[in-house]
Image (spheres, rainbow, N blue to C red):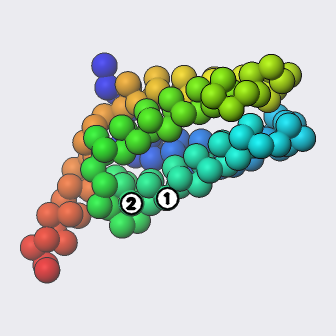
Amino acid sequence: MRFIPTKVHAVLDYVVAIALILAPTIFMFEEVGGAAVIVPRVLGVGLILYSLFTRYELGLVKVIGMPVHLVFDVLASIVLIASPFLFGFSDEAPNAWLPHIVVGVAVILVVLCSKSQPGASVSNTRAHASSVA
């Protein structure tokens, strides 16, 4: 059942992106270094970038459709969930690997509950921009 509007999803995207970038500091695993720190930060920056290009309420350029955005979310989540095992930091303290798994699973749940089409205001803006050009 998809009940999360794209506007709410958009807000969550930017909040999660900032949380991913700050996760090593928030959860105090910066000293682990390597992929434990790099993966969430790179995925956070990537999330900001593809969100800015998504055709939804908080997108800036609006060229990526919401269904494609949702696929990116799932792929990034799979990388985040798998990263402790792929990059060998699953044997560190839980604060170093558990956030990766929890956030990855949470994002997949949000994707499953998110609408795949933005509200009428975004659709009308795009239609208006097409008719003006």
Residue 131 in the image: x percent, y percent?
9, 73
Q: Quadrant of residue 52?
A: bottom left
Q: Quadrant of the C terminus?
A: bottom left
Q: Which residue is drawn at 70% across and 46% down?
A: 38
Q: Quadrant of residue 98?
A: top right
Residue 103 in the image: x percent, y percent?
61, 29
Q: Of residues 5 and 81, which is closer to you in this image? A: 81
Q: Which class describes the residues within 10 Å of circle 2: few (<14), some (14-19), or many (20+)?
A: some
Q: Tell me the residue that label 1 is attached to.
A: 49
Q: Which residue is drawn at 18% across and 59% down?
A: 124
Q: What amino acid type is highlighted by mark number 1? A: Leu
102 shown above or below 122: above
On screen, residue 99 versus residue 95, left or right, reads: left
Q: Which residue lies furthest to the left in this view?
A: 131
Residue 31 in the image: x percent, y percent?
90, 41
Q: Tell me the residue that label 2 is attached to.
A: 53
Q: Which residue is drawn at 31% across and 19% down?
A: 1
- Tell me how far mark 1 sits from mark 2, CA to CA: 7 Å
Circles 1 and 2, Cβ within 8 Å, touching? The answer is: yes
On screen, residue 34 versus residue 133, left or right, reads: right
Residue 34 in the image: x percent, y percent?
77, 43
93 shown above or below 41: above
Residue 5 appears in the picture as rendered: no
Q: Which residue lies furthest to the bottom in this view?
A: 133
Q: Of residues 118 and 20, which is closer to you in this image? A: 20
Residue 87 appears in the picture as rendered: yes
Q: Which class describes the residues within 10 Å of circle 1: few (<14), some (14-19), or many (20+)?
A: some
Secondary structure beneath label 1? helix
Q: What amino acid type is highlighted by mark number 2? A: Phe
Secondary structure beneath label 2? loop
